[in-house]
Image (spheres, rainbow, N blue to C red):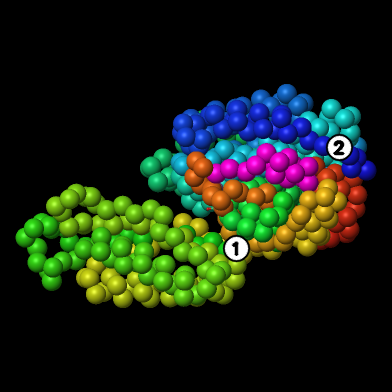
Amino acid sequence: MHQDLQIDIGRLAARLSELGAIGSTGDGGCARLALTDEDRAGRDLVVTWMADLGLDISIDEIGNVVATRPGLSEGPPVMCGSHIDTVATGGIYDGNLGVLAGLEVIETLSRAGVTTRRPLAVAFFTDEEGARFSPDMLGSLVYCGGLGVEEARDIVASDGARLGDELARIGYVGSAPCPGLAPYAYVELHIEQGPVLEAHGEDIGAVTGVQGISWQELTLVGQSNHAGTTPMSYRHDPGLVAAEIAVQARRLAVGMGADQVATVGRLELVPNLVNVVAAKASMTVDLRNTDEELLAEAEAKLAEEIDEICRREGVSWSTRRLARFAPVEFDPTVVSLVEAKALGLGLSVRRLASGAGHDAQMLARMCPAGMIFVPSVGGISHNPKEFTDTGHLEAGANVLLQVLLDLADTDVLGSQVEAVGVEG
Ligand code: GLV
Ligand code: MN
Ligand code: MN
């Protein structure tokens, strides 16, 4: 069944670099934070490509865009996609690959005159990165009914902007309702963003699930004072506390073992001056683990330690939850299908869990879902140096093509599809 069909890597690579040029940071990287002018320009370009392919484009109330190609029969589509927003220091592959590979699969099928039994859809979801508006995977979370539209629109960005206002400003408030329609299945091609596939010399990752994510923002308030006149024993220094928390977070993760990771990615001191003991520190802590119980244990241990450090220094603290998602396991049939299709194409494949968050983990709430990973050179991502070899981009997109064809044309998922409902 169309096993000899192949995507055109030249076309896919050209689209990746054309989209990557929007918001280019001049060093190979890309800055298209969600709902900025750059995001709008990127969206407009991808929507133009969707229209050029004759797809039926729908925009929903939170700005998710779904482009559908009819099948021979009606019914929910087999969906692929990802996101096109980036972190401020992003590369050109994270998210963009999944969306543009989806368009490339559609173009390949159209040129070959192939119509699938079930419809196919390519989606890009709003604000996957969460780098401007938290939580991450926000658009797909709303799509799946895990967060209300109004609540999401009221979220305020790190730069003070309100999500709903920014969505309207860039012209992406659509009329399709959220939660959206459950697809028949969802498959996302993505770069691994970590070192595992490259280290083992494998071409393709059959992703088994996504680890749990805990994001919090800590506010530490002390006593601002003169750096020269204040004896050390008189100080209530939130800068020192922030530093100790960062050290403790690292110790905690290392102490708990390989599956626990901890990151202090943002730290701001007020007033941030050379000769002033800080009045306030604001910092984020990102904790992740594939095991929900261990993740909860890490959160509790860190909270105890923060309390102890603050008490010692006479600094008060408060915390605001930015994101909290339990680990997700992907549909075993979809995982096996990815593996089988990669092997069928003569590619080496490895099962692995994702360290990064993805829209697929939200879609897994409403339909059988899975992911295909391709190696990231040096395991580097969220960095302008993010890179994946062209051969691996091509391999990943060809696996996506074959997986989508099987999901759209066969009953490989059996009767389980009807049994899956939407979770709140
Ligand atoms: C978001 O994509 C994350 O994993 O931080
Ligand atoms: Mn991504
Ligand atoms: Mn990312």
Say which element carries label 2: loop
Residue 109, given in percent of the width and then of the height, sits at 84, 33
> As displayed, is residue 413 above or below residue 305?
above
The C terminus lies in which quarter of the figure? bottom right
The residue nearer to you, when weighing 126 against 104, is 104
Residue 141 visible in image: no
Which residue lies most toward the left here? 229
The crowding category of the residue bearing disc 1, from other C-alpha atoms within 10 Å (few below 14, some 14 to 19, many at least 20), is: many
Residue 200, given in percent of the width and then of the height, sits at 67, 59
Q: Residue at x 82, y 50 (%)?
A: 346
* Residue wearing tag 2: 5
Residue 85, by quadrant, is top right
Q: Residue at x 46, y 42 (%)?
A: 89
Q: Of the two numbered discs 1 and 2 on the same chain, state the one appearing first in sequence.
A: 2
Of the residues shown, which amino acid type is indicated by label 1?
Answer: Gln
Would you say 289 lies left or right of 337 here? left
Q: Residue at x 31, y 62 (%)?
A: 242
> As displayed, is residue 169 above or below residue 205?
above
* Residue wearing tag 1: 211
Would you say 411 lies left or right of 256 here? right
Q: Residue at x 60, y 31 (%)?
A: 17
Q: What range is drawn magenta here?
A: 386-400
Residue 129, given in percent of the width and then of the height, sits at 53, 47
Q: Main secondary structure of the magenta part?
A: helix
Of the residues shown, which amino acid type is indicated by label 2?
Answer: Leu
Q: CA distance from mark 1 to mark 2?
A: 34 Å
- Disc 1 vs disc 2: Cβ atoms closer than 8 Å? no
